[in-house]
Image (tube, rainbow, N blue to C red):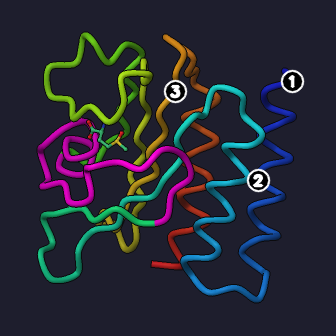
Amino acid sequence: MTDKNELFSLLINGTAQILMDEKNRDEKFRAICKLLRQNVSYYDWVGFYLVDKERRNELLLGPFEGEPTVHVRIPFGEGVCGQAAELRKAFVVQDVSKEMNYLPCSANVKSEIVIPIFKNEEVVGEIDIDSFILEPFTKEDETFLRKIGEMVSGLL
Ligand code: SME
C-alpha cells in the first residue's frame, strides 16, 4: 500500500467516527472538511455543494474549510461544479488555466477535483476540492473521495 492509501484509509475511519458523533448535519460536514484539509497537504479548500431542494438544477454552497468563495449558488452546467452535477460524473482538472468552463475562486488555485454525491441514483450534492498545486490528483484521490461521498450521502 502506498502512503497515500494509508492516509486515505485513516481519513475514512476518521470520517466514520465523525458521522457517528452527536453533531448536527452541518457540523458533521464541517468536521469532515476540516479533517481532510488538515491532513492532505494539497487539499487547500474543501467544501460541500448541496443541490437546492427548491431549484433542483442549482447547487448551493454548504459547509467548507478554506477561503470564502463568491460562488454560493451555481447553476447545473456552470463551472467545474455545475458540469459535474449536470453530467453526473467526477471532474478532475489538473490545471484550471486550461479549463474553459471554470468559475475562479482565488488566484492561488491551480487544480480542482469535484465528486458528485448520489442518493437513490440522483445527484444530491458534491465534494469540491481546490489545490494550490498543479496536477496533484491521482486515481487514489478519486476513489477516496467517492467513498467519502457514499458515506455522507445518508446525511442528505
Ligand atoms: N471552481 C469552481 C467553483 C467553486 S470554488 O472552487 C469553491 C467551479 O468552477 O465550479
Q: Which residue is mark 1?
A: 3
Q: Are marks 2 and 1 in contact (CB under 8 Å)?
A: no
Q: Amino acid at mark 1?
A: Asp
Kindly state the secondary structure of the residue where label 1 is placed: helix
Q: In 3D space, how far apart are the residues under numbered discs 2 and 1 (Cα atoms)? A: 14 Å
Q: Are marks 3 and 2 in contact (CB under 8 Å)?
A: no
Image x and y of residue 64, in percent: 51, 57
Please give the count of numbered marks on the rendered protein: 3
- Of mark 1 and mark 3, the one earlier in the sequence is 1
The C terminus sits in image quarter: bottom left
Regarding ligand 1, which quadrant of the image does it lie in?
Answer: top left
- The residue stretch that appears in magenta: 63-86
Q: Residues within 10 Å of mark 2 (few under 14, many from 20)?
A: some
Determine the image quadrant of residue 8: top right
Left or right, residue 64 beside residue 107: right
Asked if residue 85 is among those painted magenta in the image, a careful observer would answer yes
Q: Along the line of sight, which residue is nearer the eye, 60 or 144?
A: 60
Q: In 3D space, how far apart are the residues under numbered discs 3 and 2 (Cα atoms)? A: 20 Å
Q: Which residue is mark 2?
A: 12
Q: Amino acid at mark 2?
A: Ile
Left or right, residue 69 beside residue 135: left
Q: Measuring 21% from the left and 29% from the top, which residue is drawn there? A: 102
Q: Amino acid at mark 3?
A: Ser
